[in-house]
Amino acid sequence: MSLVWNLLRQHVSVPQLVGFFFANLLGMLIVMLSVQFYRDVEPVFTQGESFIKKDYLIISKRMGVVSALGGRSNGFSRADMEEIEAQPFCKSVGAFTASRYKVSASMGVEGLGGMSTEMFFESVPDRFVDADMKEWHFEEGDLVVPIILPRSYLTIYNFGFAQSRSLPKLTEGIVGMVDLNVSLRGNGREGLMKGRVVGFSNRLNTILVPEAFMEWSNKVYAPVADGVPVRLVMEVDNPADDAIARFLQEKGYETEDDKLDAGKTTYFLKIVSGVVMSVGLLISVLSFYILMLSIYLLVQKNTVKLENLLLIGYSPWRVSLPYQVLTVGMNVFVLLLAVLLLMWLRNYYLDMILSLFPQMEEGGIWPSCTLGVVLCLLVSTLNVYAIRCKVMAIWNHKD
């Protein structure tokens, strides 16, 4: 093969091959990096405590509209919920269920006395809860009720109440150790239970308990059914859809905490990720085209030499082998270099992500590397096949 290569390499265009090399490297790196970055930040979208897991809106009826309508209830009827769920932008709807009895709690740490306060409970369907669900369950007869607090409550305490009174700041772990005695009163009955904070929510600004507990406690301590929710949580397909804002405006509904704007930002980030991956694939396709053009021009320049080699007894396989080794070798080298660059870039951005989300689990790079190997095999196979076809065309022409 060395003799054949020495004969054919005279017309090898180094600038064309260098152009292919860097174009292919850039395309493969962008594709692999897009996949790897998405997998690394996927827990931010999908873990229970994620703040951008899905696009949710908390909606309620505008109080001014309710007053103008002659004091009509500001609750959502079953017809209202069915109308909302029937909208094309809505994926699902859940209702907030409030406790219809008195709730008070006293708290302390490790048996020491603390403070007591009146409070309230609310629940939503479990699929809308953005916290760890491993301890989020309740059955009738349990003496402990799991509770999820808004993360904003902890922030207000640490940077407002505690700081102004020189009190120690609390972490989420310390709050989970707090002894919470919950008193339930209503319907001529009184009950005492233990409460345990099992998580914090970024999405729902309320004191959450499991839906099973809420159904049981309302049945025992408030048998008179009210059943009209005043707030709904809605999962939407595309928060940037103008139809959402128009519908809320027409119905006199409003959202909490500018969630619609946050949802638009999340949707924009998803679109950007898809665009970046598409650009990487496009660059890979263009680099493949550059390589094929270079090989075709190289073969075309060497047509006479190739015909002579075939005439003196060299097989098409031996004649095409140098070009195939050249292209496959470059593809493999591109893959190895892309993996090294991917690891370097990943270490750079992963430190920033873990500093923002220390609870996030770090994944591996095997999915993106697998994709790189698949792309390398695909491109190499196409290259080998195209070179083989070109040499066979010369072989058939000489006959």
Image (cartoon, rainbow, N blue to C red):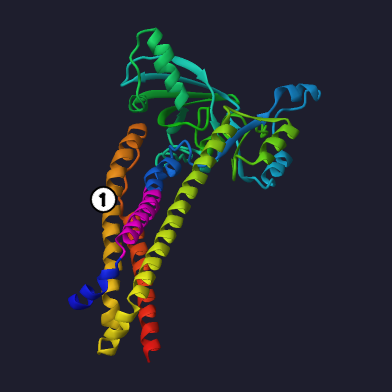
Question: What kind of residue is marked 1?
Answer: Leu
Give the residue furthest to the right: 70
Foreground: 116 or 80? 80
Residue appearing at x 67%, y 45% in the figure: 85
Foreground: 93 or 222? 93
x then y, percent, for residue 277: 45, 51
Q: In this view, does 251 lie to the left or right of 363?
A: right
Foreground: 375 or 121? 375
Q: What segment carries the magenta color?
A: 13-36
Packing grade of label 1 (10 A; few <14, some 14-19, many >=20) is: few
Is 143 situated above or below 8?
above
Residue appearing at x 33%, y 32% in the figure: 355
x then y, percent, for residue 25: 34, 55
- Tell me if residue 26 is in the magenta stretch: yes
Q: Mark 1 points at which residue?
A: 340
x then y, percent, for residue 96: 59, 34
Q: Is mark 1 on a helix, strand or loop?
A: helix
Q: Is the magenta stretch mostly helix, strand or loop?
A: helix
- Tell me if residue 388 is in the magenta stretch: no
**Quarter residue 235 falls in:** top right
Residue appearing at x 40%, y 19% in the figure: 107
Q: Can residue 96 be seen in this view?
A: no
Q: Is residue 240 left or right of residue 104?
A: right
Is 240 situated above or below 314?
above
Q: In which quarter of the image is the C terminus?
A: bottom left
Foreground: 379 or 123? 379
Residue appearing at x 75%, y 25% in the figure: 65
Is 242 situated above or below 179?
below
x then y, percent, for residue 72: 77, 26
**Quarter residue 1 falls in:** bottom left
